[in-house]
Image: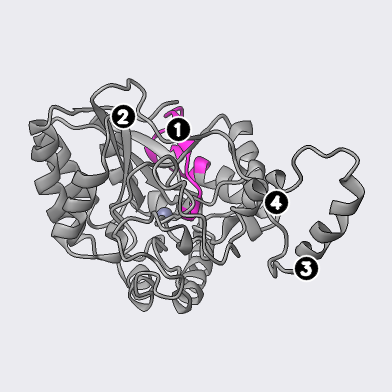
Amino acid sequence: MVKSRIPAPRRPLLLGACALLGTSALLVACGAPGTPAAAGDAAHRSAPPSASTGTTGTADGTSSAVRPTPDGDRETGAVPGRTPAPPAPGGSTAPASPYASPSSSPSAPGSAAPSASPSASRPATPARPSAPVPASHVLRHTASGGRTVALTFDDGPGPATGQVLDLLAQYGAKATFCEIGGNAQARPAAVRRIVAEGHRLCDHTVDHPQPMHTRSHERQVAEIADARSMIEHAAGDGTPIAWWRAPGGDFTAENERIGADLGMKSLGWSVDPRDWSRPGVQAIVANVQHDLRPGGVVLMHDGGGDRSQTVAALKQLLPWLVAQGYAFDFPQS
Ligand SMILES: [Zn+2]
């Protein structure tokens, strides 16, 4: 049933979605399938690096504040290990709640009744529909560990994918490409080159819906399953796709299960230089150099708009990684 969908005609929807997103703070990697830079770009610009949410200014998507708008891959809540601390001030963000509540009523069994009332009043506060159950198996480390790094590129393939591949080849680096179904379908040659040169593929949905957790279960199944089919078809039937990455890192227990049922693990990241927002080449480079730790997974983009800064940053980062003794690896699977 899911596979019966016809991917091509869906592209227009994507653009529309991105346009809408552009009005808010999300935008991010609204990788417009098939649309080189236009849509994605517009979205990114309109969103001054999460001003609304109160991002700390850092180029990394760490600030939990960004959460409200699970946008592009600047995923906020996604920054796992390193950003656990900043419990959103307003705490209005959904993902945070699940962790907070438990501690409220410690150990008083009998006090259960009394505490009920206070907690009951809270539910009214959150305006959002329903708090999604957070995913619990998002991978954010390399397969081998040690002094290794896993480079990941989202929202492609796009016009810059060839340049990224050329650079990776120059340094003997392997990476993982989280592709949007429509883009893979539109650029099958790029997908095949990625595979032929030893890189790996990851499913990044068909339309890059954001926030993904607000979509119906059926829609999420289709987004993940259809993209998987489209990417595999472009790469060559039988090509393994071990991971899937939720747009904006919006992983939930629900969509994680969908991916798992399709044989894919949830791929997150540990370093987000926010290259999608085009903060400047040096900002991208400095962010990676500052945040990367052995075994880290770096998030960058080869699609979703003008990626010239990403390419320029990569030209500096690849030799730096080599000089630092890092070996290129794939994510855990
Ligand atoms: Zn993306």
First to last magenta residue range:
228-248
Task: Assess disc 1: are there few (<14), some (14-19) or many (≥20) residues with their C-alpha within 10 Å of its C-alpha.
Answer: many
Ligand 1 neighbours mark 3 (CB distance < 8 Å): no
Q: How many marks?
A: 4
- Amino acid, disc 1: Ile
Which mark is on residue 218? 4
Q: Nearer the viewer, mark 4 or mark 3?
A: 3
Task: Assess disc 2: are there few (<14), some (14-19) or many (≥20) residues with their C-alpha within 10 Å of its C-alpha.
Answer: many
Q: Earlier in the sequence, mark 1 or mark 3?
A: 3
Q: Nearer the viewer, mark 1 or mark 2?
A: 2
Classify residue 44 by image quadrant. Answer: bottom left
> Which residue corresponds to mark 1?
241
Distance of mark 4 from mark 3, alpha carbons? 28 Å
Q: Earlier in the sequence, mark 1 or mark 2?
A: 1
Task: Assess disc 3: are there few (<14), some (14-19) or many (≥20) residues with their C-alpha within 10 Å of its C-alpha.
Answer: few
Q: Is residue 107 magenta?
A: no
Distance of mark 4 from mark 1, alpha carbons? 21 Å
Figure coloring? one colour
Query: Residue at 41% of width from left, 60% of height from top?
Result: 33
Left or right relative to 138: residue 302: left
> Residue 8: percent from the left, percent from the top?
50, 58
Callout 1 secondary element: strand
Distance of mark 4 from mark 2, alpha carbons? 35 Å
Query: Residue at 46% of width from left, 27% of height from top?
Result: 238
> Residue 202: percent from the left, percent from the top?
42, 39
> Which residue corresponds to mark 3?
124
Q: Earlier in the sequence, mark 4 or mark 2?
A: 4
Callout 2 secondary element: loop
Ligand 1 found in image quarter: bottom left
